[in-house]
Image (cartoon, rainbow, N blue to C red):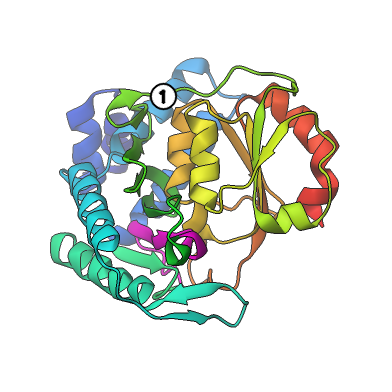
Amino acid sequence: MRLDQFWEHIFSEEIERVRAAWRALKAEERLAVRDFLVRAADDEDRLAAQRQAAAFALSVIEVPPPGALEFAREVAHQTGRHLTNNKQFDVSLKGDGTLVTTLDVEVSLKLCDSIKDRFPDHGILSEEHNTVYHGDEWCWVIDPIDGTTNFAAGFPIWGVLIGLLHFGQPVMGVAEFPRLGYQFYAVKRQGAFLNDVPIRVSQATTFASTDLFAICTRTAKRGVLPIDCKIRAPGSLGFEVLSVACGQCVGNLGRTVHVWDVAACWPILQEAGGVMVTNLAEELFPLHAGVNYGRVEFSMLSTCTSGLMREARARLSAFLDS
């Protein structure tokens, strides 16, 4: 395919022509084309029609592989059932002082094996294994038990988080909280759902005394937050973010966060209308090839609206940035 024909296909706003152009690319060419489309879609100096065509092309090439969502939902559900029914496990401390159980490791290996069996060309990042991102076009990010301390204690707020990245950018997320009977999921540009029912964030633009705001225990130890809300500490960062996505909380603040804590939740929150920022010097996503994300630790803040985010950052900057 000639170069001029390629770009005609990519900007055609016809699904099959875009797909044909994308399939014709070599693996090493795809990242450069995707990055160009991202820049074109966000370039205010370009004609609106050009930005629209670039955004359309992205919407086509970022669609997860056939069956990926159904696979993730099923494997998350089965993993949750397995964890709920398994009462025999050992608990130990990691080097950072957090708990890990033998089931964390066992389930992580099983999830990795299931993904490799179904999608052998995809990469995997996991809290317990494979912490280096290798630049794969498609990469799964898993947290086998989000809220391990809760799980080990028998407290019901814990979950299985499974995210899917396209060139390091989250495009799909599934989060199963089996003891609560909750399954959240989203695909980029296709909406967010809880148990197959569409969800949306609260429309709050300022804090109110009746609002709920979720925090982690490390945030609680920093002192009283300067916001007029009812504070909750569920003990699962994924649940905290998703409580914002479904409108239960207006925001959440987490410290000592890793990419597997948020990769699955990021697209769900965005599709529900929410906003998330971190204290990293540059954006967390897309991930960068060769980075060991086990060593990348950050604080994150999510809110239901951009208006509330402005107020939250003004009030909570000391908690987020320190």
**Which segment did they paint magenta?**
132-150
Image position of 200 (left or right of 254): left
Residue 59, x across and y down, in percent: 34, 32
Residue drawn at (28%, 55%) of the image: 80
Residue 114, x across and y down, in percent: 19, 64
Image position of 199 (left or right of 276): left
Is residue 134 depicted above or below 147 in this figure?
A: below
Image position of 55 (left or right of 247): left
Q: Is residue 302 visible?
A: no
Is residue 90 depicted above or below 322 in this figure?
A: below
Where is residue 192, by image quadrant? top left
Q: Check if residue 134 falls in the magenta segment.
A: yes
Is the residue marked by circle 1 packed among few (<14), some (14-19), or many (20+) residues within 10 Å?
many
Q: Amino acid at mark 1?
A: Ile
Residue drawn at (34%, 48%) of the image: 179
Residue 221, x across and y down, in percent: 77, 57
Q: Is residue 300 visible?
A: yes
Where is residue 138, by image quadrant? bottom left
Q: Which residue is mark 1?
A: 199
